Amino acid sequence: MNLILLSKEDLTDSGKRAVISGRRYKHIREFLKPDVGSRLCVGLVDGKIGDGRVVTLDDRSIELEISLNEDPPKPIPGTLILAMPRPLVFNRILGHITALGIKKIIIIHSGRVEKSYWKSPVLKEENIKAQLVLGLEQAKDTMVPEVSCRMKFRPFAEDELPGIVKGARAFVAHPEGASGMLPCGVKGAFTLAIGPEGGFLPDEVAAFERAGCERVSLGDRILRVETAVVAALGRMIG
């Protein structure tokens, strides 16, 4: 935890202090091991970053006197469209994406995605929020990404996708028939679509291309989805 992320519910009436308990309290006590007077890096959800001076410390909670005066890192002007991954890796992927600074994430269906994935508890709002918080704490960021799910591919591709990619450089990662490698250091807004294990189906790739996405490759190696996501975003924002 490189930053203690505070919510408005943590703040006292004055807004000058915050009381922390639960998971964050446990991490602070076990790993940061502060004393009264110690200063910790804190940030307010969707707000500024600063420090918190430990005022009181007991067996259940920590009270901080906070001062927030720094802006969080600039968000990456990109949208990631991701076919619903296996639930076992969903949480890790979401944390990686958040830590890299992407603020718009759209989880979609694909013909190679098992329908049972959409019934997984990892898609519950409280779990998604928890994974986003972990990613923000890692990256010392406070701006919470927007995550949405689309369980039907065709309506998404036909009705929403053209508007999403408008005015941005848009890519679909698919090595077969790719026009070239995914570019490095893309400037300005972009949209990137990454498929499930095994990739998007041919008609799905065609739907992305009709909407204005360029078919690109990540190289000769076959990557797991969680590796492909990090590798691709790393190239684009590097």
Image: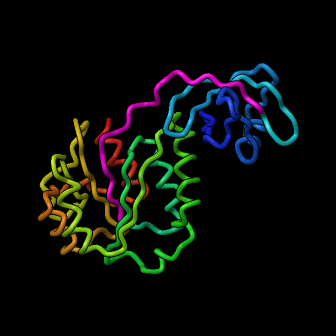
Position of the N terminus, as image quadrant, is top right
Q: How is the image coloured?
A: rainbow
Q: Residue at x 87, y 35 (%)?
A: 58
Q: Is residue 220 above or below residue 197?
A: above
Q: Is residue 102 above or below residue 152?
A: above
Q: Residue at x 46, y 74 (%)?
A: 118
**Where in the figure is residue 43, as x and y percent of width and height?**
57, 32
The question of residue 143 being in magenta is answered with: no
Q: Determine which quarter of the picture holds residue 61.
A: top right
Q: Is residue 22 above or below residue 115?
A: above
Q: Is residue 31 left or right of residue 192?
A: right
Residue lying furthest bottom: 115
Judging depth in this view, the residue of 24 and 6 nearest the camera is 6
Position of the C terminus, as image quadrant, is top left
Give the overall secondary structure of the magenta segment. Answer: strand
The question of residue 71 being in magenta is answered with: yes
Span of residues in magenta: 63-83
Q: Is residue 103 left or right of residue 204?
A: right
**Where in the figure is residue 185, as x and y percent of width and height?**
25, 36
**Where in the figure is residue 115, as x and y percent of width and height?**
42, 80
Q: Residue at x 52, y 50 (%)?
A: 132
Q: Determine which quarter of the picture holds residue 30.
A: top right
Q: Is residue 150 left or right of residue 47?
A: left
Residue lying furthest right: 59
